Amino acid sequence: MSIFMPILIGLIAVSLMSLIPEPHRRRVNAVVVAGAGAAYLSGGGLGYWEFVLPVVMSYVAYRGLESWAWIGIGWLLHTAWDVVHHLKGSPILPFAEHSSFGCAICDPVIALWCFAGGPSVFGRVRARLSREPAAPLASPGGRLR
């Protein structure tokens, strides 16, 4: 399986979430990470252990309502669960054998963005484009400033 597509999916998810203004962006992401905790409940193949992640992710998501770091932790917890499912359980998408592996690659991309504070990707691009050109290092007389 190519790792390019899961990384691209993670970048697309980050870009779409960037369209939501703060502080709603953080709160929406907390709800999404809580939902990710329940992704394997419909037949993940680990029996009663499947109930552990939703409980843990509910707590993490609650903390994530006020903290981007907790949301990032939630995505990393989901990554670990994806790896367990890739090795021992059922895939997250029953029709795609390696979907849990792909999810384990995608989730850290989102986690890194969360650890950076969930900044707007488009806001950063806009800020870079609106900056004035950098001043030259040398003054007109040839000396460095």
Image: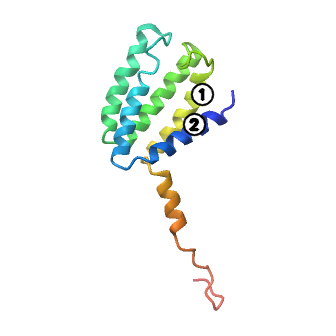
Q: Is residue 39 above or below residue 114?
A: above
Question: SS for tag 2?
Answer: helix
Q: Nearer the viewer, mark 1 or mark 2?
A: 2
Question: SS for tag 1?
Answer: helix
Q: Quadrant of residue 5?
A: top right
Residue 108 appears in view? yes
Residue at 69% x, 31% y is 2
Query: Please, what is the three-letter code of the amino acid marked with disc 1?
Result: Gly
Between 143 and 13, which is closer to the camera in this rendering? 13
CA gap, disc 1 to disc 2? 9 Å
Q: Quadrant of residue 4?
A: top right
Between 49 and 28, which is closer to the camera in this rendering? 28
| Lower sequence index among marks 1 and 2 | 2
Mark number for residue 13? none
Residue indicated by mark 1: 102
Residue at 57% x, 78% y is 135
In the rendered image, residue 35, in percent from the top left (x then y), is placed at 40, 27
Mark 1 neighbour density, 10 Å: few (under 14) some (14–19) many (20 or more): many
Q: Name the image quarter holding the C terminus.
A: bottom right
Name, please, the residue furthest toward the bottom.
141
Mark 2 neighbour density, 10 Å: few (under 14) some (14–19) many (20 or more): some
**Discs 1, 2 touching: Cβ within 8 Å:** yes
Q: Quadrant of residue 140?
A: bottom right
Residue indicated by mark 2: 9
Query: Please, what is the three-letter code of the amino acid marked with disc 2?
Result: Ile
Q: Is residue 41 above or below residue 58?
A: above
- Structure colour scheme: rainbow
Residue 37 left/right relative to 106: left
Q: Name the image quarter holding the N terminus.
A: top right
